[in-house]
Image: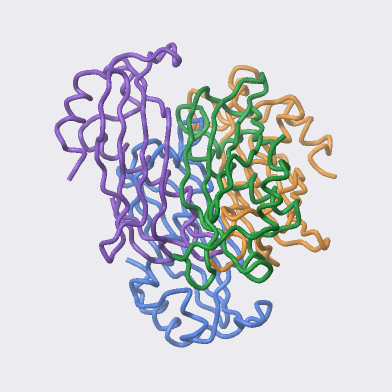
Chain colours: A orange, B purple, C green, D blue
Amino acid sequence: MTFRLSYGDCDPAGIVYYANYQRWMERTHTEWWFLQGLRFDDLPSRLGVAVVTRAASAEYERTITLFDQIECRLYATSVGRTSFTMRGDFIREDGTRASTATLTLVCVDPHMPEKAVPVPPPMRRLLRSGSAGR
Amino acid sequence: MTFRLSYGDCDPAGIVYYANYQRWMERTHTEWWFLQGLRFDDLPSRLGVAVVTRAASAEYERTITLFDQIECRLYATSVGRTSFTMRGDFIREDGTRASTATLTLVCVDPHMPEKAVPVPPPMRRLLRSGSAGR
Amino acid sequence: MTFRLSYGDCDPAGIVYYANYQRWMERTHTEWWFLQGLRFDDLPSRLGVAVVTRAASAEYERTITLFDQIECRLYATSVGRTSFTMRGDFIREDGTRASTATLTLVCVDPHMPEKAVPVPPPMRRLLRSGSAGR
Amino acid sequence: MTFRLSYGDCDPAGIVYYANYQRWMERTHTEWWFLQGLRFDDLPSRLGVAVVTRAASAEYERTITLFDQIECRLYATSVGRTSFTMRGDFIREDGTRASTATLTLVCVDPHMPEKAVPVPPPMRRLLRSGSAGR
């Protein structure tokens, strides 16, 4: 997904407000699942799991400013038994990387969110298909 | 409620991002109801209504900037049969008003959100008590 | 512009958080100016004015929920001597209107933000061209 | 700092939207510096440095929901030559931890944001004073 920075995305230093990368990361990965036919809010009824965020991180290398465009390139970097990690590379218009973010998600029992359960095969297939990468 | 402006609240012009007033307005009025003992998410089970936002407005008179404090003073300005309007005056540290916002909320049937229903007496009493004002 | 609702856009009632309409409105109109060749942050150096938000309003008619798409159709509804008003109609995928928002902006002296100045002719032309409408 | 979750802080799953922890983290640490007498926007003129965010991370252990209160306890966990890391523990009302976030900040030349410079002694003293901890 591509985002153009608006006034609401920047801070008084004139640059992107850093927490926005996590918003874009969430937006890009839920959109990716959506385009693959899996709505995250349907997972409990369709696949018997819910997905919760376990960890998030970001490293900021270069900054971006008002009206710049940033492209989020999404990759599934690891798929474990009950969790998986996605990485987003945020690329500026000049082709350099502004930031990298990761998101680790865990599949849980929708009725007992503390109980991790295996990543359902359809999700595992999609993650492995490389469709999340480019 | 009082808010101090942080980096995430300001825009590249160095001043408050205007849509934040609506966030503070929502925060202040749901907090006020909460402190009166009425959680908005409990209204369906306790009073048989849900509350939806019908209209919002704001006028911006003076601006505020990073690290300024702003106080939201909340008033119930009108109470109709099925709806009510709250006003928030946002006062700067120098005592002048930065902005005024209004919020018009409607009570609806929780199962049919298009159907307006009367404001329940307990809510009406609270709104009229003047507790919402100062 | 078209927006698909993500988790970060919705509230615990499962519907769009109402203040987001003002964010989309800002995003759509600054993008429109940008696409016409006028960056808002360049206005002081290019046209000798700054633009500040004087008033905003919104009416909510129907709601939208997670993964719905909403299209913002932007119109310049009035152009005065020192200010102008833009309206955004937010249209759901079924063609019905979810909400209408307005934004009144004032041109001011960049060095004296309290002093309103005339809308510069290039901005006036763009607003009148109907390019803001559809 | 203590935050009570409002509608705008939660997502359609009814729980806190995860990116908010980064907003609270930024808010808490800039407020801490502010209360110590150091405004971050004054650093270039007062100490000849600017501070930029290099990395951020968060781990989510337990969730919080609408109207819950969360307390951010801030600690300076490491102070290097040009950078320092702050950790925020987010504690629920029942005393358990909801989440831990870290923020790594780098001091840079205000005129060459790519050039790291030493953490100025006054900042170093404050970080070491333990005032950031509790």
User: At x 30% / y 27%, what residue is drawn?
Assistant: B84
**C55 with respect to C127 (left or right):** left
In this image, D46 relative to D116: left or right? left
Instruction: Specify the farthest residue to the front.
Output: C81
Going 29% across and 40% down the picture, which residue do you hit? B31
Residue B25 placed where, x, y %? Answer: 36, 43
- How many numbered discs, if any? 0
Instruction: Tell me the quarter of the image containing the C terminus of chain B.
Output: top left
Q: Position of residue A116 (x, y in %)?
A: 56, 32
Please indicate whether residue D95 sits to the left or right of residue D27 in the image: left
- Coordinates of residue C107 in the picture (x, y in percent): 55, 59
Q: Position of residue D133 (x, y in %)?
A: 36, 68
Q: Quadrant of residue B75?
A: top left
Given residues A120 and A131, the one toward you in this image is A131
Q: Nearer the viewer, residue C121 or D66?
A: C121
Farthest left residue? B129
Quarter of the view holding residue D63: top left
